[in-house]
Amino acid sequence: MNTLTENIFETAVRDPKALRAALEEADIVPAALVLVHLTGDVAILDEMRPYIQGGWNYMEQVPEALKKRVRDRLVLALENRAANPDLPVLADHKTLHHIMSASVGKDLPEEYVPLFIEELGLAGENPRSLTWRGDTTSMGLAEFRVVIVGAGLSGICAGVRLKQAGIPFVILERNETVGGTWYENDYPDCGVDTPSHFYSYSFNSNPDWSRYFAKRDEIQKYIEDTTDKFCLREHIRFGVSVQTARLDEESGLWLLHCLDGEERTLTLACNALITAVGHNVPATPKLPGLQDFRGEVLHTARWNADVSLKDKKVAMIGTGASGMQAGPALAPIVRKLTVFQRTPHWAMGNPNYHRTVPEGQKWALRHIPYFNQWARFLIFWAASDSFHDTLFIDPDWEQPDLSLNAKNHQMRENILAYMREQLDGDEVLMRKCTPSYPPYGKRLLRDNHWFRMLKQPNVELETDPIECVTSNGVVTRSGDFHEVDAIVMATGFHASKLLWPMEIVGRGGRTIREIWGDDDPRAYKGMSVPGFPNFFVLAGPNTILSHGGSAIFHSECQVTYILQAIREMVERNLRILEVRRDVHDRYNQLVDDRHRTMVWAHPGVTSWYKNANNRVTMTSPWRLVDFWAMTREFDPNDFICGVAAPDAVAA
Ligand code: NAP
């Protein structure tokens, strides 16, 4: 039985004019799904099925007469619910499966039904919060301490869940506020390329996103608002950066050595340590002569808004996700923009990328029960698992250099047609911009008017490699000199050097760097490392989603799992909870085996997703439903459990 109350349905129908007006603007597919959810009458969906081609709203072509029928019937259904608040609202498994399948135009595997019941909160709010299995007063919970390093999206997620579970914790954050990567990245036109109604916490959806793909300031505000809504600030120590975390093997405690903003030393101890530091140490290429450049050098990840680039001659190095956004924002204001491209990236148009959300859609998301959930379902599916099967290499494919399989090849053709149209058929630019590896080999970018930018008279695309930098310009290998006043590094992060520059010292005094090296991190389910008990990594090895999906969903899965691990420690008074070596190795073998058949291991791809030995270390090979299933239930049999010494209490 759902916990929705009478008031929610009443709110939807209280102002019939507003409801009608909103429905005129709101997406019709989620509206129909709400209707079927409330009435159980699936016939209308079967009528709509031929006009639905996936989860994106711009792909539906439902005729007006049918839309009107959906709207009329939905108004009646909501009125009926407002008058009969005691009717059950959770549709049965079979109906939910039917709704889901019809709305995405394919027979959805049954395993998705429980995932979406949980993700959408269809069976009640907060399904991912921790449940204790006994009386916590007798468990020493009050003395247990967790430290989270980082108050970005994943650290805040962990904080919310720890707080709900009543587990004492502190978050250490080096910046003066929350947000992490989103706080630090504020280059021109910085924004998200995952749909915002999916790139948000399942426990704190935001019906007010102004755009389908929000820009940085709105995302930062969302993180700040979430922090306040869940009263987390009192748990966060700002301006504190962790230098070293060292395991005390005797007590099982982690001893942290930190510096505050005034370089004063702070020490802390905790029973469990969670790192939530993302991949945000900016990488600047070591270009010969860079130190002699007399102009400004900016990095997208450390933007300095005080530096004006207006009417300047600017070099931008790098054409990944950050360059894709910054370049088109800079081109209209600078005198000349020279883009230095080492490797082209695949970039695809998405009409919603540039759109604001209509007011009627926002009203429906806020006021119509279940509209928000079904809209999230559609976009979750469209932006993630719906195309995961296209990422595998077909061993019999005839054009293995260009693409992976027939569907991937079709994608390639679609993008090329899109690029040709955007570039007005400019074959010179087409050649320069066409990657030599299959789509999805690197993160597929959303076109931020990049190709249109390249057609502007003040923009030049340089594909000759950079030889050196001089005091006033950039020289390429063939000897061409580009005079510039400023250089913008859109050159990404030291992403594969996970947890760097922190020093994490585990069992036997071995550091995580000794074990992982600079680029070979491994962990069980991306979170646990043998030799590092009571230690959990968020956004760790092989957990990055690079084909689609939402990093927030992955964080929520990991946090669910970690909280259950902590519950195990608290309830059993464990001093040590350490992943078994054989379990860890078997899991990583599975990851490696799977990656060998997937796009990121394609020999034509160079990226920070794989290391110098061609092993894919960063991306997750799993469907979202797989990762959800493997993180849903913590299994203590996968871990070595050691009982706590009587005085093992964190200071
Ligand atoms: P990135 O994807 O690593 O791209 C870095 C770019 O710099 C690449 O084009 C790379 O070329 C180039 N580069 C690096 N070193 C170079 C050198 N020595 N000489 C010439 N070119 C060089 O970094 P990013 O664009 O900052 O994005 C990083 C990640 O952040 C993304 O994958 C994404 O996960 C996230 N991100 C997301 C968004 C969003 O949601 N909208 C926005 C920004 C970032 P090669 O390709 O040849 O290596």
Image: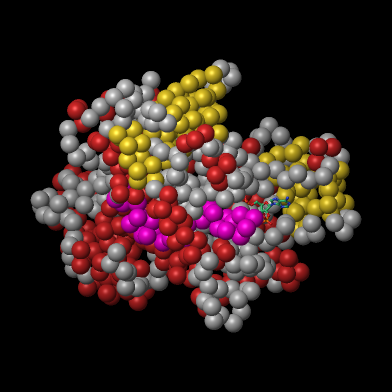
Which residues are drawn in magenta?
609-634
The picture places residue 284, in percent across and down from the top left corner, at 70, 43
Please tell me whether the stretch drawn in magenta is mainly helix, strand or loop: loop
* 604 vs 227, nearest the viewer: 604
The picture places residue 475, in percent across and down from the top left corner, at 85, 51
Residue 560 sits above or below residue 399 on the image = above
Specify the farthest residue to the right.
479
Residue at the (17%, 32%) spot, across then down: 135
Quadrant for residue 308, please give it: top right
Was residue 282 drawn as part of the magenta stretch in this picture?
no
- Determine whether, in the image, residue 222 is placed left or right of residue 1: right
Residue at the (32%, 73%) spot, across then down: 107
Does residue 20 show up?
no
- Determine whether, in the image, residue 334 is placed left or right of residue 377: right
Question: Number of numbered discs present?
Answer: 0
Residue at the (25%, 69%) spot, across then down: 98
